[in-house]
Image: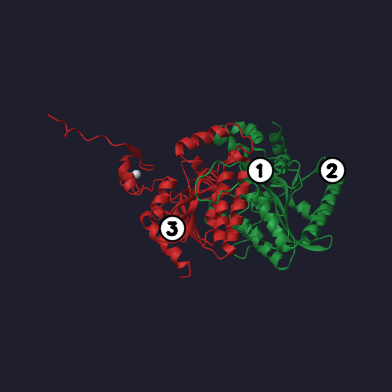
Amino acid sequence: MNQVSAAPVTEPTVLCEKCKQPISRTALIGSGYVCPLCGKYNRIPARTRIELLTDKGSFCEHNATLVGENPIGFPGYEEKIRTAREKSGEYEGVICGEAEIGGERCCIFVMESAFMMGSMGTAVGDKIALLFEYATAKKLPVIGYTVSGGARMQEGMLSLMQMAKVSGAVKHHSEAGLFYLVCLTDPTTGGVTASFAMLGDMIIAEPGALIGFAGRRVIEQVMGQKLPDEFQSAEFQMKNGFVDAIVPREEQRNFLSRMLRLHTGR
Amino acid sequence: MEAYEKIKKTRQSGRATSVDYINGIFEEFTELHGDRRFADDHAVLAGIATLNGVPVTVIGIEKGKNIQERMERNFGCVSPEGYRKALRLMKQAEKFGRPVICIVDTQGAYAGAGAEERGAGAAIAENLYEMMTLRTPIISLMIGEGGSGGALALAVADRVWMLENAYYSVVSPEACASILYKDAGKAPEAAEHLRLMANDLYGFGIVEKVIPEPESFTDAEGTKHFFHQLRRDLSREIKHLSHMSRDTLLSERYEKYRKIGRYESDTAPTPAKARRVFFGRK
Ligand SMILES: [Zn+2]
């Protein structure tokens, strides 16, 4: 007798970020990392995000292996970077390049949550600034996806300065009459919120994403009270006037290509 | 743990605050209130004045001198409307060709629920964005505490000058210690590693000048001399910056920030070998 009718091979599973239920990896990938049980938008690896958004085979990466050092000699930082590289399979916390979306050429950056929670150090800041400078020179629009815990403290003040540097590069791009659309994903906080995340001509967000400047616990301490669940959600930011639209994941590609088309003057 | 000792001293009252700098350096200060959008944030004390006869716009973060003032000034923690007031007055300065002098002294932007609702992040972002291309000279003085983005929002400038005992950091040593070491008690260690004192930042090319402090700000003679010197230096620097063409001023301002953590780019779209990084002053 052969054994074809044996029990199904157990599939590799991952735990949903919210409901913590095991979900088959293939099912999760198939749903664009949206939990089939609770609807939570789980984080997507940056490279997968680019694949899902851009026209097949159109993406060309910029500065793929640009790596930072330990600029202020912070103890233990090299080790952290090494671990982050292994965990994420990426050199740094952001992937930059150019691509086509629905046939529209653009520059794109996508931050990587698996790399020290997308924290912004000098390499991240420099890659994004370089992308905006390139886009300005080539007269291209920029699409950005943010996910970040904020500035990378192991790089001290050099990381804070990236906020000014990138904001300046965004300003030059804007003054050249070029279009910048940013999509805020879960979580977008701290120094990234206080710089290029809030500087888009158009700012969209994913449903339920945490978006804010100060940390929730810090605010609760300052206020001496618990905050409601929806505090600092994408919906809260839209209600308060800081987000143009909340766009579900499956609609983003179409949304982006339409917005790019509307800004090419054609 | 030298850095942390200095920080603790810097946080104590008894140091000169923005109001002392305004009185000690400028003449004819006239306060201007409000962001014309929502409110007047008392953590920001701003207006127009003259410096050696030259009209300037002065924007200071004021912590207050006693408990009552501190409450009213929100301990120098700036709300979004404070940053928007500052930006409004910077735009006004640009219109009339007045140089801008910012005086920064804050533990950080206000982290209240209302600040978040009114866009703390957006307000800071907008200041960074607009200050980079503001077509008039900007000098920022870091006089005590420089708490992260809340301080940077008034410090995108042609010159950033810093008092020798002031600190300026991406994160407070306490928060850094509690995140990295799960122990806020290790703040002195974190303070040492963060390289957040004036001399460190001078070395990184983040500040252009470290200003020696008087023995004590309670010593009237020494303080008077300190303000006299600072007034002379500021006046000289403003004159120098005002003589530069606006385009040169702006490109040098951008380049100053651009070179902090600059890497060699490969604009070729294929992965290339790893690049090395350059930092600040050579
Ligand atoms: Zn779930």
Q: Chain of mark 3?
A: A
Residue B114 visible in the current orientation: no
Above or below: residue A78 compared with residue A135: above
| Front label number (2 vs 3) | 3
Residue named by callout 3 = A100
Q: Colour of chain B?
A: green
Question: Callout 1: residue from which chain?
Answer: B
> Residue shown at 35%/38% (left/top)?
A14
Say which mark, if any, is on residue B219: 2
Residue picked out by circle 1: B279
User: Are discs 1 and 2 located on one and the same chain?
Assistant: yes
Which amino acid lies under the numbered mark 3 shown in the image of this protein?
Answer: Glu
Measure the C-alpha gap from mark 1 to mark 3: 34 Å
How many numbered dots are placed on residues in this image? 3
Give ligand 1's quarter of the image. Answer: top left
Letter of the chain in red: A
Chain letter of the residue carrying label 2: B
Q: Nearer the viewer, residue A106 or B152?
A: A106
User: Do residues under tags 1 and 2 come within 8 Å of each other at their CB atoms?
Assistant: no
Residues behind callouts 1 and 3 on a single chain? no
